Image (cartoon, rainbow, N blue to C red):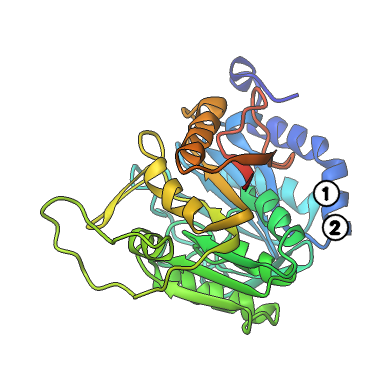
Amino acid sequence: MSITPSEQNTLSLSQALSQAINKRADFLQQAADQQTDCFRLFHGTVEGCNGLNIDRYGNAWLIQSFHQSLTESELSELTAQLNQVAELAVIYNDRSNKNSRVLNTLANDLQEFATSEQQMQENGIKFTSKLRHEGQDPLLFLDMRIGREYVAANSEGKTVLNLFSYTCGIGTAAAVGGAKRVVNVDFSSFALAAGRKNAALNQAEDVCEFIQSDAFPALRQLAGLKVGGRRNQRLPAYPKLAATQFDLVFLDPPRYAKSPFGIVDLINDYQSLFKPALLTTKAGGTIVCCNNVAKVDREAWFNSLVRCVEKQGRKVTERTWLDCHQDFPSFDGNHPLKIVALQLS
C-alpha cells in the first residue's frame, strides 16, 4: 500500500526510502532481467516525502528535491542507502526554487559526470542520458515506460507519428518494434538532437524522421487542414508538410503552452490538438492520447475524446488504458498521467 498523507509526517526520510526499496524487491529483479536500468526508486509524493524523487538513470542515482533542499546529513544518509541497492554515482539536483531550475553546485568529478552524455537502457532499448543540461528535466520521462512498451509491441510494419516527441523515446521504441516509418515532431532542436542519438544507438536512423516544428502547423498540415494562428499574431515560418495519415499516432502534449499558432491547454481544450491528430489516424489505426494533469478526471476526459471522434463521423472500436508501472505508485490508483489507446474505424 502507498503511504497516506498523515503517515508521511511520522516517517523519517530514511524509513520512507527503506520502505520504498523493500516494496520494489520484485520490481528491481524484474528490471534487471528485462535489461532495464532506468526507473523510479522513490516517488516521494506518495511514499513519504512530498517533492522528493529518486531515480536510476543508467550508471547514476538522480536525487531531485522540488519543495525543500536536502541537508548534507540527509544526502549522506540517502547515498549510503542507495549504495546498498547499487553502488553508482549519486547526483543531487536541488530544484526547490519556484522556477524548478537546479540551484546547487556539485564536486568537479560529479559535475563532469552529470553534464556528460551517458547511456541507459529500457527493455534492452538504448537511450542517451544527461542529468544536467540546458533544459530542466532528464532526457527520458520514466513514467512513460508503459507507453514506450505499448508502441514497441504494436508498431511492426506500421507508420507512426510521434507528436511532442521530446527526445523521441516513443519514436525510438516504435522503430525498434519494427515500424517501417516513424515521424517525430518537436519544436526543440536540443530534444530532437538527443532523439537522433537515440535512433543511432539502436541502429534506427533509416526509419526515423525528425521534424522541428510547432505542433499546430505540423498537425494541421498532416490532417489536411488550413494552418491558422491566434488573433493578431504574426505567424513565423514553419516546415511545409503534405497531408498524411498514419497507422499509429502518439499524442503527448505538455500541460500548457502558447505559440503564435495556438494554445496547448490540457484542462480546457484538449480537442484543439486531438481533432487534427485523429484526422491523421488511418481507419483501423490507433491513436494513443496522454494527459498528465491530475485534476482532469479520467472518465470525463475519455468521454470527451469519444465525442470528438464521433463528431468526425468515426467510432472508437477498442480502447486500452495504459497504467504506469509500480515504480510510480499513486494514493488511490488514479495516477495523474492518463494514457489511453483508441482504435478508430
In the rendered picture of this protein, how many numbered marks are placed on residues?
Answer: 2
Residue 296 visible at all: yes
Q: Is residue 74 visible?
A: no
Q: Which residue corresponds to the image point at 59% horizontal and 19% vertical from the top-left?
A: 5
Within-10-Å neighbours for mark 2: few <14, some 14–19, many 20+: few
Residue at 50% in and 42% down: 313
Instruction: Compare residues 19 and 326 and report the one nearer the observer.
Output: 326
Given the current orientation, which residue lies at the most extreme left position? 232
Q: Which image quarter: residue 49?
A: top right
Label 1 SS: helix
Q: Is residue 298 above or below residue 141?
A: above
Is residue 238 shown left or right of residue 276? left
Which image quadrant: the N terminus? top right
Residue named by callout 2:
32
Q: Is residue 99 left or right of residue 168?
A: left
* Tag 2 secondary structure: helix
Q: Is residue 249 above or below residue 109?
A: above
Along the line of sight, which residue is nearer the eye, 326 or 338? 338
Residue 52: give x, y in percent of width and height. Answer: 56, 39
Q: Is residue 271 above or below residue 180?
A: above
Residue carrying label 1: 28
| Label 1 close to label 2 by CB (< 8 Å) | yes
Residue at figure coordinates x 47%, y 54% from the top left: 279
Amino acid under label 2? Ala
Q: Is residue 327 left or right of residue 336?
A: right
> In the picture shown, does residue 236 fall above or below 62?
below
- In the figure, is residue 33 to the left or right of 294? right
Q: Residues within 10 Å of mark 1 (few under 14, many from 20)?
A: some
Compute the Cα span from label 1 to label 2. Answer: 6 Å
Q: Quadrant of residue 4?
A: top right
